[in-house]
Image (cartoon, grey):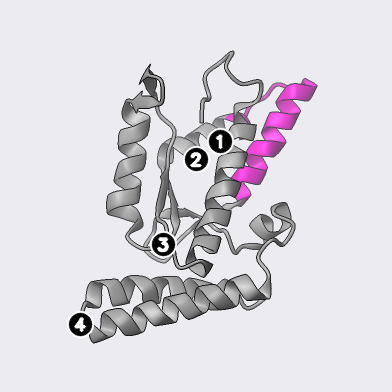
Amino acid sequence: VPLGKGLVKSPVNSIFGLLMASGLHCMVGLAAKGPVRVGIDVAWGVEYRPNEIYGAALAYSYHLESKVAQWPRVVVGEGLTDFLLHYNNAADNDLSSQFRREMAQLCLSLITTDTDGNQILHYLGPEFRKASQNTFNERIVSDARAFIDSQINHWHAEKNNILVDRYVQVADYIARYGRDL
């Protein structure tokens, strides 16, 4: 999403929308048997040609998605947390600054540290569920669990312990946080 000055009135709103869309897509993707991994970071980027993005933003996000995420989840980079902390810690008190600060606080509340030490979007956490107005119903969670179990069984039969372990990670996450949905 574009965050440059003058391009967007409130870049933190763009980040919030991206986080919400990513979390919803991650959970619904599992339920629809189309799992996704996502990497989100903030850095410079240039639209070289229409719809062709180049720069550190793309490289950092690609690295997070392809190397760090490893299983269906949304990994958040340091650039994003630093960006949000900048707005969260801003001293300005005008109405626009207060709004950006509150939105940055909300975005930060959607992020947690995963079991492997990486920052992730906590799409089953209480703040995400509140912000998404409890979008994930019992059927979505049940379908996601069924898909994850089928993948664990499939990859176990194929003797692919790497993918078994990855789906076990997702199953553990949903077991910890999905039971309240």
Image: 32 above or below 89: below
- Main secondary structure along the magenta-highlighted residues: helix
The residue at which mark 2 appears reads as: 81
Q: Residue at x 34, y 47 (%)?
A: 64
Q: Amino acid at mark 4?
A: Lys
SS at mark 3 in the image: loop
| Residue density around tag 4, few if under 14, some if 14–19, many if 20 or more, within 10 Å | few
Image: 84 above or below 63: above
Q: Amino acid at mark 3?
A: Pro
The residue at which mark 1 appears reads as: 84
Q: Amino acid at mark 1?
A: Leu
Q: Amino acid at mark 2?
A: Thr
| Mark whose residue sits in front, 1 or 4 | 4
SS at mark 1 in the image: helix
| Residue density around tag 2, few if under 14, some if 14–19, many if 20 or more, within 10 Å | some
Q: Which image quarter is the C terminus in? A: bottom right
SS at mark 4 in the image: loop
Q: Nearer the viewer, residue 126 or 134?
A: 134
Q: CA distance from mark 1 to mark 3?
A: 24 Å
Q: CA distance from mark 1 to mark 4?
A: 42 Å
The residue at which mark 4 appears reads as: 159
Q: Quadrant of residue 118?
A: bottom left
SS at mark 2 in the image: helix
* Tags 1 and 3 touching, CB below 8 Å: no
Disc 4 or 2, which lies upstream in sequence? 2
Q: CA distance from mark 4 to mark 2?
A: 38 Å
The residue at which mark 3 appears reads as: 72
Q: In the rendered structure, which segment of residues is drawn in magenta?
A: 87-109
Q: CA distance from mark 2 to mark 3?
A: 20 Å
